Image (cartoon, rainbow, N blue to C red):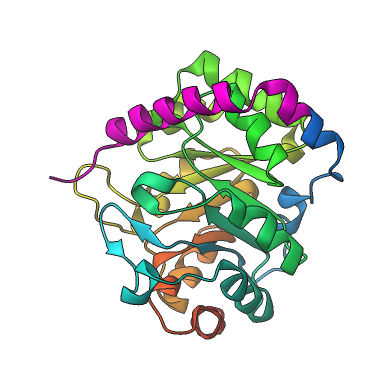
Amino acid sequence: MPVTLDEIVARTRQRVAVAKRDVPLDALRERITELGRPRNFFGAVVGQKQGTTSIIAEVKRRSPSAGWLRPEYEQAFDPVDIARRYHGAGARAISCLTEPDFFSGDPAYIHMIRDAVPLPVLRKDFIVDPYQVWESRAMGADAILLIAECLTESMLLDLLILARELELTALLEVHTMENLLRVRPHVGFPLRSYCLLGINNRDLDTMTTDVAHTLRLVDLVDDPSVLVSESGIREPADLKKLRDNGVSIALVGESLMRTEDPGAALEALLK
């Protein structure tokens, strides 16, 4: 049976409860004092030259719907090599899966990638508790993902405020028109330069992707300059369709990670 978002969130809450016991919040605060300021994720992807797309390239090993993206990833996975290839190919930022149970991610990947490339890094995970925002900052992330489908309005606002206090960019993601309308008033809260809006093109019921989903919803977005189209982007024509409709930021993962050389695949996508 396909894994549901509710199952992933439930497992995440269990993992957070264990983390809170093993690593108290004061310990995370102490780690943060030893770190420099986060890199400017928002500034890295917004305001690109006309006719170009800012790519947030994703380091992703596995997904519940697709399994291992390449057979060798089950035994060996080198996030640093992938990030370096992305950087060389023109990515503006990196997205890194850290969820361990369903995506085989690892929080350690964040520091490894940041030590190897100068790009800002998004922690791609299921944030459902303020502890995870502190945790993200302590692990070296420059941005976090907030999925509207996982969060009440009050929790979303609390997490946006905390992210800003910790100088993290928030990528506020929606899958449906209903959730877009629900969160639209909060895009850019509490400061515009710390919040991006993502439209995920994956249907959570069928797990299929369609870039046209972003195109259907873009007219409901107040500020398309901060809009990120996520999932289902496979060829240069997809990026052109998005740009023609005012969308100049895209998060691309599986279509790159399935290839032998994700960097070369990104270069081909950007041609």
Helix, strand or loop: magenta stretch: helix
Residue at image point 76% right, 40% down: 193
Q: Position of residue 151 (x, y in %)?
A: 45, 24
Residue at image point 53% right, 29% down: 184
Q: Quadrant of the N terminus?
A: top left
Q: Magenta span has 20?
A: yes
* Count of picture labels: 0
Q: Is 225 or 91 nearer to us in this picture?
A: 91
Q: Position of residue 199 (x, y in %)?
A: 45, 46
Compared to residue 162, the image places residue 143 above or below, namely below
Q: Magenta span has 210?
A: no
| Magenta span | 1-29
Compared to residue 9, the image places residue 216 above or below, namely below
State left or right for residue 71 relative to residue 224. Answer: left
State left or right for residue 56 relative to residue 9. Answer: right
Q: Position of residue 247 (x, y in %)?
A: 55, 57
Q: Is 167 or 179 nearer to us in this picture?
A: 167
